[in-house]
């Protein structure tokens, strides 16, 4: 039985947010977008997701204004997908989920290290650099293979 998509009997922002981003493929599309993936075929290659599933997730993310379609070629017409400000605001949640997964499901260590481009330090749970103390956002970091890669 599917969960209802309306919440008249409860006032729960978590439940409402999960209706939009609580699906595995949706979160992986968002993760890939943070990693710089923009084009449909590149999302498919990176994720190994079926075309119809990817189409559905990208359409939903655009409908919810988390991503937007931007033309990059006229003939034939082709689009890329970019995170909107609303999408970029998911970065702290994505990083928190990554760090939680590293703590509980990465027995060989984190598969990916989120590093500060400025000094090479790493992201802390407070979204600061463990080396220089700078507050970090998605534009301040890059990723590199970790010990569990």
Image (spheres, rainbow, N blue to C red):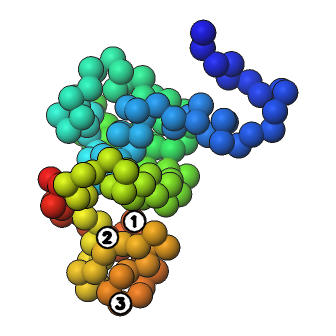
Tags 3 and 2 touching, CB below 8 Å: no
Q: Position of residue 116 (x, y in %)?
A: 30, 77
Q: Is residue 29 visible?
A: yes
Q: Residue furthest top?
A: 1
Quarter assignment of residue 6: top right
User: Going by the image, does 47 lie left or right of 95?
Assistant: left
User: Going by the image, does 11 lie left or right of 77?
Assistant: right
Q: Position of residue 145 (x, y in %)?
A: 16, 60
- In this view, 70 is above or below 112: above
Q: Residue at x 58, y 36 (%)?
A: 18
- In this view, 48 is above or below 142: above
- In the image, which disc is placed on residue 138? 1
Tags 2 and 1 touching, CB below 8 Å: yes
Q: Residue at x 31, y 70 (%)?
A: 141
Quarter assignment of residue 39: top left
Give the residue number, with chain letter if any, for mark 2. 141
SS at mark 2 in the image: strand
């Amino acid at each position: 039985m599917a969960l209802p998509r309306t919440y008249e009997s409860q006032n729960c922002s978590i439940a409402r947010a999960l209706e939009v981003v609580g699906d595995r493929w949706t979160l992986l599309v968002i993760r890939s977008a943070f990693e710089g993936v923009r084009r449909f075929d590149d999302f498919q290659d990176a994720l190994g997701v079926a075309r119809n599933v990817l189409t559905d997730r990208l359409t939903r993310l655009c409908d919810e204004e988390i991503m937007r379609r931007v033309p990059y070629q006229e003939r034939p017409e082709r689009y890329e997908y970019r995170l909107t400000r609303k999408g970029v605001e998911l970065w702290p949640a994505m990083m928190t989920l990554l760090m939680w997964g590293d703590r509980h499901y990465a027995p060989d260590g984190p598969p990916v290290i989120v590093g500060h481009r400025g000094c090479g330090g790493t992201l802390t749970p407070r979204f600061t650099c463990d080396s220089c103390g700078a507050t970090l956002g998605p534009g301040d970091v890059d990723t590199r293979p970790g010990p569990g890669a």
